[in-house]
Amino acid sequence: MTSYDLQMNSDGSVQLQNENLKNIDVDFLYHFGIDNKTTNLEKAFGDVNFVVMGGSEGRMESFAKALYNHLKDKLPDLDPQCAQNDLAKKGGRYVMFKIANTLILNHGMGFGSLSIALHEVLKLLFYAKAKNLTFIRMGTCGGVGQEAGTICITKTGYTQLIEPYFPYAACGKVIKLPSTACDETIKNFSEHVDRAGLTYAIGNTVSTDDFYEGQGRTDGAFCHYTSEEKLQWLRELSSVHNVINFEMEACLFIASCNRAKVKSLCACAAMLNRLNGDQITSPKEKLGEYVEKLMNVVIEFVSAPFEK
Ligand code: R2B
Ligand code: URA
């Protein structure tokens, strides 16, 4: 495995590893529709400490509104328009909001769109000279031995072939990036989850390219394994590898944050326990409630610096 010093940058800033950027006059963050010449990135984003990402646009919009409502009385100078002001609108691919010291954006489903968003947001915060950064993925997942509603916090992100690193393809070659998250952040966050009275689990997450066969579902368009083989695999993931959940981004999310030497955390609300089935059948309101409870913990977590 490519060995990286997993020591985070002491001032919590982003560390890029690309000498070529020094020779680029204007860097266009194409998918955000932002560049480092027309926008003064240091002024606009220099005070960011938290980056909160999740799959869907709508969820991140709601999160931005809820965080604004939570902070507006504590921070009288907060721009009343900040939860409506989509900073990535020009790019037409992602939504992005900045509420006080928190940057909020969606990353879509799976590694492809997540990877693009991470390259561009890491560069943005590097140019902005932002410090004391923590990146949080707030998502949904399928629990493995965890009931619906459980908050699953990732220790190490695994590949769909159950490897404890992210195999990053770079110019036709694979580099293996360590994908273990920051212990201290996991501990701090889990204390917040505990205080909110929610059930949580800390363990390993399998991040797949696919929601169906990749996660051993038997209800996709194709399936050539039996239900017994599926269950045997799921039980082995739990007992041998301490896997608590499936989703589609954590392994890359943590690996990229480690590479940039910033702290990371992945917390996902389980939509079902995969030991009991494949289809997500709980009512929409119930699923929304699970996500909302997780959102509220993340709000408390990122607002902590403003609490008296
Ligand atoms: C969780 O939910 C999505 C698939 O339904 C995917 O983005 C993920 O990681
Ligand atoms: N997201 C996933 O990737 N898998 C699930 O089972 C639920 C949400």
Image (cartoon, rainbow, N blue to C red):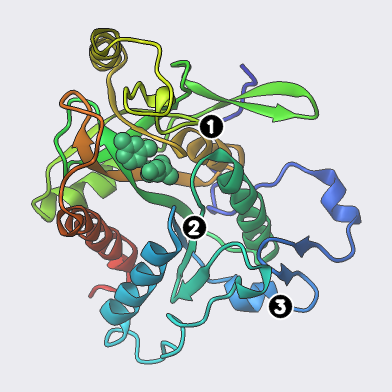
Type of amino acid under label 3: Asn
Q: CA–CA distance between discs 1 and 3?
A: 31 Å
According to the picture, the residue beneath numbered tag 2 turns out to be 132
Type of amino acid under label 2: Asn
- In front here: 94 or 138? 94
* Residue displayed at 17% across by 25% down: 145
Closer to the N terminus: mark 1 or mark 3? Answer: 1
Please determine whether, in this image, residue 167 is positioned above or below residue 240: below
Question: In the structure shown, which secondary structural element does the residue marked by tag 2 occupy?
Answer: loop
The part of the image, by quadrant, that contains residue 222 is top left
Please determine whether, in this image, residue 113 is positioned above or below residue 183: below
Left or right: residue 194 versus residue 136 is left
Closer to the N terminus: mark 1 or mark 2? Answer: 1
Please determine whether, in this image, residue 206 is positioned above or below residue 115: above
- In front here: 148 or 276? 276
According to the picture, the residue beneath numbered tag 3 turns out to be 40
Question: In the structure shown, which secondary structural element does the residue marked by tag 3 occupy?
Answer: loop
Expressed as whole percent of the image width and height from the top left, the position of residue 129 reads: 64, 63
